[in-house]
Image (cartoon, rainbow, N blue to C red):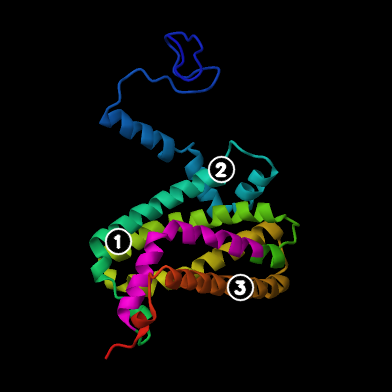
Amino acid sequence: MECKNCSLVLKTDYSYCPKCGAKIILNRMSVKNLANDVTERFFNLDNTFLKTFWQLITKPNIVIGGYIKGVRKKYMDPISFMTIALTLSGILLFFLRKYFKDEINWNSLSNGQNEAANAKIMEAMFEYNSFVFLLYIPILAIASYLTINKGNYNLPEYFVTFIYILAQYSILSFPISIAILLISPELYLEIGIPFVFFIFLYSIYVLQKMNDYKIKYLITRSMLYFFLTLLGFIGMIIALTIVFFATDVVTIADFTPPK
């Protein structure tokens, strides 16, 4: 018998390859062993995903600071963690668009304007949700790098920080969003959009853990961070609106107040 990953000759009683560490798979693929494999990979107590998820709540500086300093095996890397978050986000959008789209109250965004225009914009935002979500990373990273950086982290290190932060937010918000859709989909926007403010609060928590400011300095710098973040989001919205008009996703006529 040999390892199917590195071709090392193995004894028949081996469960893992002593060279590459791969688990020895002898049985053919089935629903049962596929389910067992997924459960073992993502939900066992020693799993890096669960460790990363929990420590990003209790000790985020250990996870992020450790990765920045070279710890690569103990916790899940930021790209893999973000991949899981984007997968959950895709699942959420699938159910939202397929089963709940017509039940969402778009009037909460209309402010007296044409509801159809807001629906078209939101449809475009859903279409490019992952891309828009990833745009948050440079906005938040640059804002925090300029305002909350007692530890003298460089900009790429802040990019890593916010990949973890945004992925954690997406994973945490997934069950809440599903619950809102199932219980009261017409309130999805009223509840969901303000909930985005949690990103700001959670990022302040993480940045304080990483930089250890005294409270009076943290408040001042948090206000600056919020101001720069707000400017960044306004700039992103303006840029996306220009793109939507340029590509005829929306037109001026869409914003004509309903009679």
Q: Secondary structure at mark 1?
A: helix
On residue 2, which mark appears? none
Side (left or right) of 5 relative to 106: right
Marks 3, 1: nearer the viewer: 1
Q: Residues within 10 Å of mark 2 (few under 14, many from 20)?
A: many
User: Which residue is located at x 48 percent, y 10 percent?
Assistant: 10
Foreground residue among 239 and 181: 239
Q: Is residue 170 magenta?
A: no
Query: What's the CA distance linking mark 3 and mark 2?
Result: 27 Å
Q: Secondary structure at mark 3?
A: helix
User: Which residue is located at x 59 percent, y 53 percent?
Assistant: 60
Query: What's the CA distance linking mark 3 and mark 1?
Result: 30 Å
The spot of residue 26 in percent (x, y) is 35, 17
Q: Amino acid at mark 1?
A: Leu
User: Which residue is located at x 73 percent, y 72 percent?
Assistant: 217
On residue 226, which mark appears? 3
Quick one: quadrant of the C terminus?
A: bottom left
Query: What's the CA distance linking mark 1 and mark 2?
Result: 29 Å
The quadrant in which residue 202 appears is bottom right
Foreground residue among 9 and 93: 93
Residue position marked by numbered label 1 in the rendering: 96
User: Which residue is located at x 40 percent, y 34 percent?
Assistant: 40
Q: Earlier in the sequence, mark 3 or mark 2?
A: 2
Q: Residues within 10 Å of mark 1 (few under 14, many from 20)?
A: many
Instruction: Give the vertical position of 141 relative to 116 (above or below).
Output: above
Q: Amino acid at mark 3?
A: Phe
Quick one: quadrant of the N terminus?
A: top left
Q: Amino acid at mark 2?
A: Asp
Question: Which residues, given as a range, are shown in magenta?
Answer: 114-142
Q: Earlier in the sequence, mark 3 or mark 1?
A: 1
On residue 77, which mark appears? 2
Q: Earlier in the sequence, mark 1 or mark 2?
A: 2
